[in-house]
Amino acid sequence: MKLVALIFSLSTIIISLATPSSCHSLALEHGLTFSIFPLRLKSGLGGHYIPQTSCSSWRLGVEAHNIIEWTSIPKECVDYVGNYLLGKQYREDSKAVTEEAYKYAKNLNLVGDGKDIWVFDIDETSLSNLPYYADHGFGVEKYNATSFNEWVDLGTAPPLPESLKLYKRLLRLGFKVVFLTGRPQSQRDITLKNLKNAGYTTFHTLIVKDSTEYNGKTAVTYKSSERNKLEEKGYRIVGNIGDQWSDILGTNIGNRTFKLPDPMYYIS
C-alpha cells in the first residue's frame, strides 16, 4: 500500500507540473506575459521516452557541439524545449555559466589602463527573444527573417537576468564591455535603445554587422574579424560569452570563453 501511495503521489506531482497555471507561472518568472501550452507528457513507465528522438540527449548533443548545422529542432521536442526554456533549468544552466565567468573574472589582476574588455553577444545572451520564439514553436519553425526583424524592431526584448547580473559585476571589477552582434547596421539604433532599457546602460561600444563587408561570410568569420580589430586597437579580450558556438570559435576569441545554453537555433 505504501508503494501504491508513493506512485500516486509522484503521479500527482507530474500532472500538476503539466497544468496551464504552472506553465503560466514559469513564464511570469521570466518576466514574460504570454502563456505556454500545457506539457503533453510523452514518457512511459519509468520515464522512458516514446519518440525516436530522446530530446534531452538531443539537447546535450547540441550544447556539446556534436550536433551541428541543424535548421530546426525535432518536431517531437517542441514541448521539451518550451518547458526547458520557461522552466527553472534554463535559468539554472545560465546561472552556472555566468557564475563560473564571474569566479574567473574576480581573480584576475587587471592592468588598470582601460584596455581589458569582455565581449558579450546579444541575442539569447544579453537579450532574450523568448517572447518571439514562444509564438514560433521554440525553434521548430524554420527561421523567418521578416517576422524576426519585426520583433527586433519593437525593441522590447527582456534581458537574460543572469547575463545582466554578470555584466554589472564585470563593470564593478573594472572591465569594459563590448557588445558584438550579428544584427545589421539598420538595427543599430533600436538595439542600443533596447539594451539601455533592459539595464545595459554603460558599455564601451556596440558592434553590428556591416552587410557589405561581410556579405556571404559566416558568423565565425565576421566575429573573428571584429575581435581582431579590437585587439589591433590595443584592447585585451579577457572574456567572451555567447549562446552560439560561432560566438566563441575562430580567432581572437579571448583568454576564456563561456557558452550559454540555446536549444532553439544554430548559427554557423
Image (cartoon, rainbow, N blue to C red):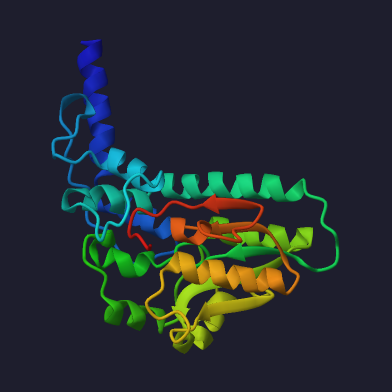
Along the horizontal axis of the image, is 204 left or right of 30?
A: right
Q: Residue at x 41, y 73 (%)?
A: 217
Residue 20, compared with residue 190, is above or below; it is: above
Q: Position of residue 23 (x, y in %)?
A: 31, 52
| Residue 116 visible within the image | yes
Residue 210, compared with residue 236, is above or below; it is: below
Q: Position of residue 171 (x, y in %)?
A: 73, 64
Q: Residue at x 41, y 69 (%)?
A: 218
Along the horizontal axis of the image, is 196 left or right of 88?
A: right
Would you identify the image quadrant in which residue 73 lies? bottom left
Would you identify the image quadrant in which residue 110 lies? bottom right
The front one of 226 and 165 is: 226
Residue 221, compared with residue 193, is above or below; it is: above
Q: Position of residue 11 (x, y in %)?
A: 22, 30
Count how many numbered circles sit on residues in the image. 0
Q: Residue at x 37, y 53 (%)?
A: 85
Q: Residue at x 67, y 72 (%)?
A: 230
The front one of 38 and 219 is: 219
Q: Position of residue 177 (x, y in %)?
A: 67, 68
Q: Where, quadrant-wise, is the N terminus in this rendering?
A: top left
Residue at the top extreme, as displayed: 1
Residue 166, compared with residue 2, is above or below; it is: below
